[in-house]
Image: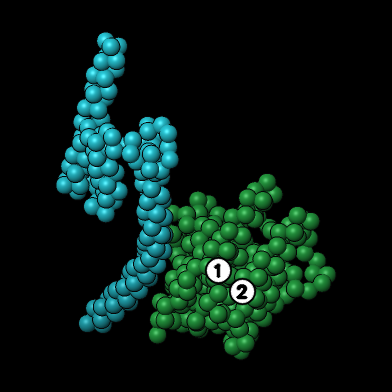
Chain colours: A green, B cyan
Amino acid sequence: MNEVLIIIPAFNEAENIESVIEKLYLEGEDQWDLLVINDASTDGTGKIARATGKTTVIDLPFNLGIGGGVQTGFKYARRYGYKYAVQFDGDGQHKAEEIPKLLAIVKSSSADVAIGSRFNKKHNGFKSSFLRRIGIRTFEWFSYILIHQRITDHTSGFRAFNRKAIVFLADNYPSDYPEPEAVVLLGKNSFIMQEVFTQMMERKGGISSISLARGPYYMIKVLLSMFMASIRSKTYKHEF
Amino acid sequence: MNFNSTIGSNIQVTQYIAIAASIGLFIYITYLVRNKRIKEEYSLLWLFFSVVFIFFSVWRNGLEDFARLIGIAYPPAALFIILLLAIFLILIEFSRIISRLTDRNTTLAQELGILKMEVEKLKNARKEKESAEDEEESSKETKS
């Protein structure tokens, strides 16, 4: 067993999952353990992942959503004593070769959590609409008020965690739109986060979880959950 | 005179119905709890409000006094307020219970997923071990 676990949440990613696993496997050179969380996919994602023989696959009995899926990964990581965990999307939008950048941050203990950000660099080439940018700015501003840490990319699902964060999130990972809420939760519980610029690939398949029509609803819901996370009492339980 | 007494007797009938209904509600909930169809902790609000209903249906002036106390001119409106309050509280309680169930359900699903994977791994390991042993045995047999 290695000390790094790559948590790959996947829901109906039959098109992408195999290449995602292959790339991670090549990049990891036997230094990373892979864990696919198959969130009750209906297109055989779990079967395809298992057939590669290069990853552990957990099949959830019914769809829990991205939060519940990723949390399963943290529970697994806590149970098996992994020192570091990386959250990596199963849809192929993250680059496996950028994982070492994130790992370097948590391994050097300069931060508990490393977040792969599309935005903390100018001319990053990531195309996003005006409305989307407003949303992103709002998150940045709102969470700065709440936790006094400047995070530019709240919706990024490309993150690395140390053991302390793994143990904490195994119990407390948020459920519905978990990424922004997790930032606030971690900040409130005095975890240090650090961003690093990462590229995101265009989506190859699947559907983004945020559609334009539901944008405002999404914003309100996320801002509310961020606020709630910030006034929630500290829930950190020491495992050791 | 005659007209008034008709209304008077009607109100009395209404009161009897109200008393019967409130007591009926109380008995029904007690029955459900007794037979473990409702858990005690979830029945508390229901029982509390059915007692409140019995109280106000028996003591009609009580409703009027209560209405006056909270500044409502029309006593039946006070009844509606009590009713709304009861429904609100019970529904909020339901939301709380549903949320807790959802959380536990999620935890169970996660644990189940992890356990299923572990069982699968153990099974595979045993299968490999058994087939290795079988090979050993068969090779021994051929030697002897």
Which residue is rendered at x = 62% and y = 78% of the image? A193
Which quadrant would residue A222 be assigned to in this image?
bottom right
Residue B87: x %, y % from top left: 38, 42
Q: Amino acid at mark 1?
A: Ser
Residue A166 visible, this angle: yes
Which quadrant would residue B104 be assigned to in this image?
bottom left
Q: Amino acid at mark 2?
A: Ile
**Number of marks in the rendered image:** 2
- CA gap between label 1 and label 2 equals 8 Å
The single residue placed furthest to the right in the displayed view is A123
Residue A158 visible, this angle: no
Which quadrant would residue B106 be assigned to in this image?
bottom left
Closer to the camera, B1 or A221? B1
- Residue position for label 1: A230
Residue A209: x %, y % from top left: 62, 54
Helix, strand or loop at mark 1:
helix
Q: Quadrant of the C terminus of chain A?
A: bottom left
- Mark 2 crowd level (few <14, some 14–19, many ≥20, 10 Å Cα): some
Closer to the camera, A14 or B8? B8
Q: Is the C-beta separation of discs 1 and 2 under 8 Å?
A: yes
For this view, does A90 lie left or right of residue A126? left
Q: Earlier in the sequence, mark 1 or mark 2?
A: 2
Q: Chain of mark 1?
A: A
- Residue position for label 2: A147
For this view, does B109 lie left or right of residue A73? left
Q: In the image, is residue B27 above or below residue B20? A: below
For this view, does B92 lie left or right of residue B39? right
The single residue placed furthest to the front in the displayed view is B1
Q: Label for residue B105?
A: none
Q: In the image, is residue A77 above or below residue B94? A: below
Which residue is rendered at x = 67% and y = 51% of the image? A215
